[in-house]
Image (spheres, rainbow, N blue to C red):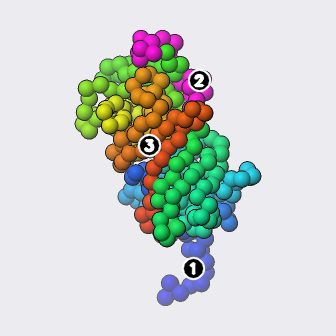
Amino acid sequence: MRGNDPNRKGARMQDILPFAKLQGLGNDFILLDGLAKGIDLSPGQIAHMCDRHFGIGADGVIVVRPSPQPGCAAYMHYVNADGTPAQMCGNGVRCFAKFLVDNGYVPAANGKLVADTPAGPRPIAFEVDAAGMLTRATVDMGRPVLDPALVPVDAEPDAVALFGEPFAGALSLDSPWGPFAFACVSMGNPHAVCFLDDVDLDVFDVDTIGAFFESHPAFPEKANVEFAVVGPHGIAMRVYERGCGETLACGTGACATAVAACLTGRATRETDVLLRGGALHIRWADDGHVMMTGPAAESFRGTVSLRERNPA
Ligand SMILES: N[C@H](CCC[C@H](N)C(=O)O)C(=O)O
């Protein structure tokens, strides 16, 4: 029988990777352990894995790699569902921490670790359950970057007209649905936050309008686009992510939204961002660092074939 051919089995083993599927508020990721053996995937392989019909299905892939930085537990290599890499992923880094703790790379008793990321080191304090599995984490997401040149965004100078407050990364962009005012912030990755008034976010066409602005020329590296409505219980927000589309939650987007809301007089320095997948607690600390607290959970584990491709 063909199934007993040792040569065939050898070929199959090289093409199959174990993975873990984790999520933070429904923002879901495929995690691959690259600590012992290097894992380099093509954009096509990433896109196949993330396809919700032809692959596993996810918003992105996280490859856990050794970190050269002293004091860092490991390095988080994050890739969007379309195969494009990104500098930071807030929900992803909580799942990254969970992967390290649950698999024994970091002792649960430590209660903290430092994640190395393309945006720099990110200290994390985590909670575990009775079995020592990580359940929630608070991530020091670093300082927001407000200089338009570094977001990057081709901003306009006159923010006061848009927000009633000075804001460096402000601009108004025309669209088939009228003008939209954005407050742009980087958390290591670019975000364009639009505050909407008197809009029911549940029926707002995030897919169409978000896609229009994600690739707008005003954003040289594209942008994660957030639509936010400030309310009595926090900031409701939906997000169209760069390289992915709408996700149920976005940690860096929640941080960017909270910072923009604070700077434009719409919120205090501590608030809940209410996403479709749940709430993230954001505190913009006095030292300028943004602290993000939220859950992380494992959905399942499995093995994935690297030979498969999406049909053309
Ligand atoms: N979901 C991620 C953001 C991914 C950002 C990525 N789409 C980009 O290109 O910057 C988060 O929780 O922060």
Q: Nearer the viewer, residue 39 or 13?
A: 39
Q: Are marks 2 and 1 in contact (CB under 8 Å)?
A: no
Amino acid at circle 3: His
Q: Position of residue 144 (x, y in %)?
A: 56, 32
The residue identified by callout 2 is 147
Disc marking residue 9: 1
The residue identified by callout 3 is 281
**Which of the two discs, 3 and 2, labels the residue nearer the N terminus?**
2
User: Residue drawn at (36%, 41%), measured in percent from left and top?
Assistant: 274
Magenta segment main secondary structure: loop
Mark 2 closeness class: few <14, some 14–19, many ≥20 residues within 10 Å: some
Residue 8 occupies quadrant: bottom right
Q: Is label 2 within 8 A of ligand 1 (CB to nearest ligand atom)?
A: no
Q: Are marks 3 and 2 in contact (CB under 8 Å)?
A: no
> Helix, strand or loop at disc 1?
helix
Q: Looking at this rendering, what residue extends furthest in the front direction?
A: 286
Mark 3 closeness class: few <14, some 14–19, many ≥20 residues within 10 Å: some
Magenta residues (range)? 144-165
**Which of the two discs, 1 and 3, labels the residue nearer the N terminus?**
1
